[in-house]
Every structure is written in structure tokens, then in C-alpha cells.
Amino acid sequence: MNRLRRVAAPPPLGAPSSTQKERTLSELGSSLGPIVGLAERGDILVLSLAGELDLADAPALRDALRGAVERSPRRLVVDLAEVTFVDSTVLGALVEARSRIGGEAFALAAPGLEVRRALEVSGLDRHFRVHETVSGALA
């Protein structure tokens, strides 16, 4: 499978570090997995994913979701804007995270057409809070 991985450039020399707000990929448990960022927005965590997510990505995703849930945020938003495909194992990992943190504290944001279709076909769109944008999920 051809996978697109987005990596952020480091801040310019002398610029304030973003380490207070965002975690590095190694801190999330995988430098090669589907996780491209974890950002704090007040008491809300935004976990950003990217690429085609399948069985091979599920362990890294589960670990990142578990770590985010253990931090007890008021809300956990999973940013799906850069995700082009999800399979049933990835959907299962999202269901597990929602069960751990509680339905009202878990939201999906910015799913593309293929991801939205997977949510609809599985019926999970009726169980997850799905927002068109990350901003909408933060409101």
C-alpha cells in the first residue's frame, strides 16, 4: 500500500517550542504509524491521523488512543481530515476508545468521503459524534 506520511518541520531557531502543546510521534508510541499529531486545546485533546488505516495500523492507533484517554481530557477529538481509508479494525479501535472515555467526551472530526461511507455502512455514524471540521468538534 502506498501511504502518505505528513511530518511537521521543526520551528525556526529561536522560535518558541511547540513541545508544550504537541507531542512528538515517538511519545505517541510510533514514528511510522498513522498518528501525525496530538495537540492540547485547553482541556481538549486532538489526535490527528493520516493515510490509509488498516489492520497493520490498528496497534499503534490503539496505543495512541489509550494514551490520550488516560490523560482524562474533557473531550477527545480524532481528526480524520488526512485519512483516506479505514477498515473494520480501525473502526473497532475507535469504538474501544469511545467506550473508555464515554460517548459525550469522544468526537470524530473532518472525515472524508471514504471514511464517512465506512461510518455509515457500519452504522457507527449513529453512535459517534461526527463533525464536519475540527473547529466544529471543539465548540
Image: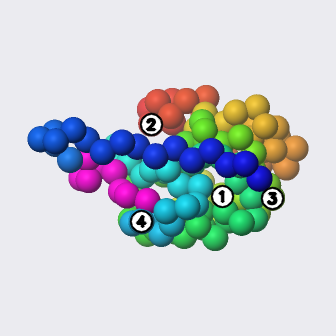
Closer to the camera: disc 2 or disc 3? 3
Q: Give me the C-alpha separation between circle 2 and circle 3.
A: 26 Å
Amino acid beneath label 1? Leu
Q: Secondary structure at mark 3?
A: helix
From mark 1 to mark 3, how far is it between C-alphas?
A: 10 Å
With 58 as the anchor, is 15 left or right in this view? left
The amino acid on which the numbered mark 3 sits, given as a three-letter code, is Ser
Relative vertical location of residue 134 with respect to residue 2 in this rendering, above or below:
above
Report how far apart the C-alphas of labels 1 and 4 lie in the structure. Answer: 21 Å
Q: What residue sits right under mark 3 in the picture?
A: 88
**SS at circle 2:** helix
| Residue found 53% across the figure and 55% down from its top | 35
**Three-letter amino acid code at the position of disc 4:** Ser
> Mark 2: which amino acid?
Leu
Looking at the image, residue 70 sits to the left or right of residue 55; the answer is left
Extent of the magenta region: 18-25
The secondary structure making up most of the magenta span is loop
Farthest-out residue, left: 14
With respect to residue 106, does 65 lie above or below? below
* 98 left or right of 125 in image: left
* Mark nearer the N terminus (1 vs 2): 1
Q: Name the outermost residue toward the right.
A: 121
Label annotation for residue 94 = 1
